[in-house]
Image (tube, rainbow, N blue to C red):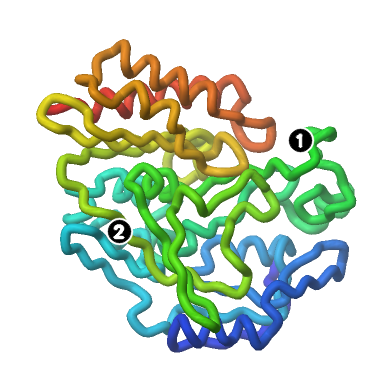
């Protein structure tokens, strides 16, 4: 049995207080004990990903700042646009009638995360901040010590997936992120000095170790999605076990119709590289068309070209790259006018 390491827990009552606690306790400070560099202070909401990682000693923070009792941490407000508080559970998002009707891809993505028990605890903020994954990283400390670690836990070691790579290639695996990208979402952060907002499309970078442009003294507070009049969206996911696994290839697509013609389009992918990606080359051929088979094939080829799976998770590289093409075709066909 893997046990949690020792840590202290402080419950914040507001996001501002949580940000202040991060600043006061050395947010960003690194502990390099036991050969595993880790942050000394971290945030925890539902804990569905963080606690298993701590059991494997991927993280051993001295202090956890809990967001579980933050005032108004959970909530969904819809008034043309959609506002979702970061502490809203994935179950609440998947079951919300307004989201299912108007922001369908997000409801589908939330419903496909893990199991009902974990969706009842896991939050949208936690899923957006999900750590990258890799077969060389998601192992026990005993296993990783025996193998000599990897670049993600020891920068002095080469990447075990591609030994000539100058960066970590751990893969992005959050289900809700491609849906949020396709829906044009914006995320809001708060630190000890104020707040800022970042378009979802600018939040991630091609770096398996530091995949987000989120500072370590910041707290994600809420997510905003613009109005969806005329939009239809969907999310498709491939995984090993259909009941609960992480994606090994996933596609989200959103189409805005102006009568019988596409006026705007977005296609996003995840689990096919170190960052979730909004594939702009896939959207361009769709605009101004009736979403015919030839147009869909062009978009799918663009996604196939953009997909960069590596041999660091389940499934073969060719299988996952092919799935990106097939899932794009299926998603776009499903968005044709009924």
Q: Residue at x 53, y 80 (%)?
A: 66
Relative to 198, does residue 47 appear above or below in the rendering? below
Q: Is residue 1 visible?
A: no
Left or right position of 80 against 52: left
Dividing the picture into quadrants, the one containing residue 262 is top left
Q: Which mark sits nearer the N-terminus, 1 or 2?
A: 2
- Residue at left 17%, top 56%? 98
* Quadrant where the image shows the N terminus: bottom right
Query: Residue 337 placed where, x, y %?
Result: 14, 27
- Does residue 19 lie above or below 127 as drawn? below
> Which residue is at 22% across, 58% downward?
81
Q: Quadrant of the C terminus?
A: top left
Does residue 158 appear left or right of residue 78 in this picture?
A: right
Mark 2 residue crowding within 10 angstroms, few (<14) / some (14–19) / many (20+): many
Q: Which residue is mark 1?
A: 161
Secondary structure state at the residue bearing disc 1: loop
Instruction: For mark 2, give the secondary structure.
Output: helix
- According to the image, label 2 marks what residue? 93
Is the residue marked by circle 1 packed among few (<14), some (14-19), or many (20+) residues within 10 Å? some
Q: Residue 116, relative to residue 192: is it above or below?
A: above
> Quadrant location of residue 134?
top right
Residue 65's x, y, as percent?
A: 57, 81
| Residue placed most toward the observer, 221 or 153 | 221
């Amino acid at each position: 049995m893997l046990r949690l390491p020792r840590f202290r827990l402080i419950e914040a009552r507001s996001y501002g207080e949580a940000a202040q606690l991060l600043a006061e306790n050395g947010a960003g400070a690194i502990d390099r004990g036991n050969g595993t560099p880790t942050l000394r202070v971290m945030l925890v909401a539902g804990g569905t990903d963080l606690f298993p990682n701590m059991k494997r000693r991927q993280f051993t923070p001295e202090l956890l700042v809990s967001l579980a009792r933050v005032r108004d941490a959970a909530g969904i407000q819809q008034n043309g646009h959609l506002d979702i508080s970061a502490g809203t559970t994935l179950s609440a998002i998947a079951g919300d009638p307004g989201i299912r009707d108007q922001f369908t891809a997000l409801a589908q993505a939330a419903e496909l995360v893990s199991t009902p028990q974990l969706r009842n605890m896991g939050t949208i903020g936690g899923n957006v901040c999900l750590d990258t994954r890799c077969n060389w990283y998601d192992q026990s400390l005993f296993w990783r010590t025996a193998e000599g670690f990897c670049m993600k836990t020891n920068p002095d070691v080469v990447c075990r997936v591609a030994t000539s790579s100058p960066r970590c290639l751990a893969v992005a695996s959050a289900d809700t992120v491609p849906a949020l990208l396709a829906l044009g979402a914006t995320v809001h952060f708060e630190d000890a000095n104020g707040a800022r907002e970042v378009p979802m499309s600018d939040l991630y970078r091609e770096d398996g170790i530091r995949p987000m442009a989120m500072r370590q003294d910041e707290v994600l507070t809420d997510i905003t999605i613009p109005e969806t009049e005329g939009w239809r969206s969907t999310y498709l996911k491939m995984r090993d076990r259909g009941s609960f696994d992480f994606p090994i290839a996933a596609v989200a697509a959103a189409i805005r119709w102006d009568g019988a013609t596409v006026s705007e389009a977005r296609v996003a992918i995840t689990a096919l590289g170190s960052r979730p990606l909004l594939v702009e080359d896939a959207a361009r051929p769709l605009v101004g068309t009736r979403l015919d088979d030839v147009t869909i094939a062009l978009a799918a080829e663009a996604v196939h070209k953009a997909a960069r799976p590596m041999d660091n998770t389940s499934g073969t590289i060719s299988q996952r790259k092919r799935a990106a093409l097939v899932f794009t075709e299926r998603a776009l066909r499903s968005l044709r006018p009924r």
